[in-house]
Image: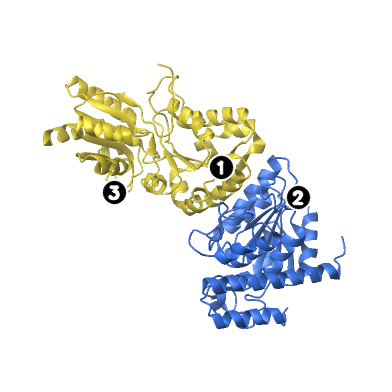
Chain colours: A yellow, B blue
Amino acid sequence: MKEELAVADAYGKTLAELGRENENTVVLEADLMKATGTKIFQDMFPGRLFQVGVAEQNMIGIAAGLAASGKIPFANTFAVFASKRACDQISVSVAYPRLNVKIGATYAGLSCAYGATHQSVEDVAIMRSMPNMVVIAPADTIELSKAVREIARYDGPVYLRMVRGKMPRIFDDDYEFRIGQAPVLRDGRDAAIISTGVMTSRAVAAADILKKEGIKVRLINMSTIKPIDEAAVVDAARNTGAIVTVENHNIIGGLGSAVCEVVCKNCSIPVRRLGIEDKFGYAGPFEWSLKHFKFDVPDIINAVKELLDSR
Amino acid sequence: MTTISMEEINRLKSIARTLRREAVKMVGRAGTGHIGGSLSCCELLTALYFNILNIDPRNPDWEDRDRFVLCKGHATPMMYATLAERGFFPRSWLETFDVPLSKLPKHVDMHSTPGIEMSTGALGQGLSAAIGMALGARLNKKSYRVFALLSDGENESGQTWEAAMSASKFGLDNLIAAVDRNKLQVDGATDIDEKIMPLEPLADKWSSFGWAVMDIEGHDFKEILTAYEKAKSIKGRPAVIIARTIKGKGVSFMENNAAWHHKAITAEETESALAEIEQDKMI
């Protein structure tokens, strides 16, 4: 298996490709270019990267004005700063007027090891509840690159949730990403796991271990958290009768909540939400946080088994 | 610099009187509205829309048009009166001001109203969008300018100064801002008595952020036109016009009274205000 690109490198590389293909592609940074990965874009198109310093609110507003001028701005920062410091600006200057701004929000969830000030446990809940906003969390760098290309084609606001570091490869190069379409990565009828973003690789590992133990789960990669693929959720609910959701986010308001909203509207079945249980994070490696907050591979396996036992 | 004729000044004064009247009528019909800050920016909007801006009301999406961002997005009575008078939409629309689902909502919405370039209303956000438009003009190799009108209260917002810093960094000489310096906001006076948040020396603040600053009497057309002409000639940095104005200008019982920032208005008050504007006593 070839060496995976870091998420930031894949993001920057794809933006640079887009920059070459479409001169309307512009990038905005708030003093985190080295983390977001867009230095390559700046090197190639210095006139189309706007560095505003530590001023995320202004960055989003400028992006809105650029979008109103026909540009396709990708405004990048950490998920905490995008979703909270610039929350009002994204709502009023981007989502409400449906301006074509893409928000590249990285170091999401507990993937940032710096502790609670830099760990976004609320961003999906905030962005998901914003009218007109699309929320996407790719599961590997293939899906990320495809998603970046797809959202550049889509005319409207998008919140793209990324993580620090690398993600294990899940998809082939010929994978096709579509907004709002959730690929089924494993099929089975005993239970379903619905995961998003960096947690999908853990969900794959859990599903494969469960299979060896004779439990066949359907695994859905819900990369588009909003608009959620309702048909995929309903089908999984009807055909498996038990769903475990897994996300690198507070279990309040994120993927698990979104899945429950679909389930309780269509067919009532038990759903177990795995993620951060309404706590702020701690400084520490992501692997440590997964274990500490109990949403790692063994926790996913246990959740599936407990759900099956309780039926 | 071109001289400004008395005919032009008188033409603009006449238009301003019409706009004041229409704005008061809109608020009278709606029962409430942001009339104080509408009356204070009457001459600024009149000068922009009837002399300065390069626009075509029949083609509001013309790609080479000057852009105007009403950062003080609640000054809609005057904004809509201006756009209607300039021909962006029929005057009859003004009767729908603040009616639910009308094309003329209480805060400007770029998708509802022809001629509105940016949806605003949350103070402090408009200047950033104007900067984006000015950068867009540069990238698109267009010579249009971007104009922004801020309230003075917005100068208390952090984002305004983030924006001020960045416009200066980007050297946006195609961006001209104005501040409607009426010294009153919802809770009282910015600098005197209540001291909501003292802003002076405001011109020095903008100057220290790298902007060319002009400090003018904001109800005097000669000063307004001269300032905008000068602002257009500035190279390499953005310009801001601090326009000293009177909140409620033109209606004596509204003038310099923060209560008229946004207030219910009776039929009698409406009539009285209209009569005063007709007499043109105050202007």
Q: How far apart, in angstroms, are the residues tagged by discs 3 and 2?
A: 50 Å
Q: How far apart, in angstroms, are the residues tagged by discs 1 and 3?
A: 30 Å
Q: Which mark is residue A29?
A: 1
Could you say where residue B133 lies in the image, as x and y percent from the top left? 65, 48
Which kind of residue does numbered mark 1 sit on? Glu
Q: How far apart, in angstroms, are the residues tagged by discs 2 and 1?
A: 23 Å
Foreground pick, B257 / B14: B14
What chain letter is assigned to the residue under label 2?
A: B
Residue B115 vs A269, above or below: the answer is below
The residue sitting at 64% across, 65% down in the picture is B81
Horizontally, is A5 left or right of B97 in the view?
Answer: left
Could you say where residue B266 lies in the image, as x and y percent from the top left? 53, 80
Could you say where residue A179 lies in the image, as x and y percent from the top left? 43, 33
Horizontally, is B258 left or right of A204 in the view?
Answer: right
The residue sitting at 51% across, 76% down in the picture is B264
Q: Which mark is residue B236?
A: 2
Which kind of residue does numbered mark 2 sit on? Gly
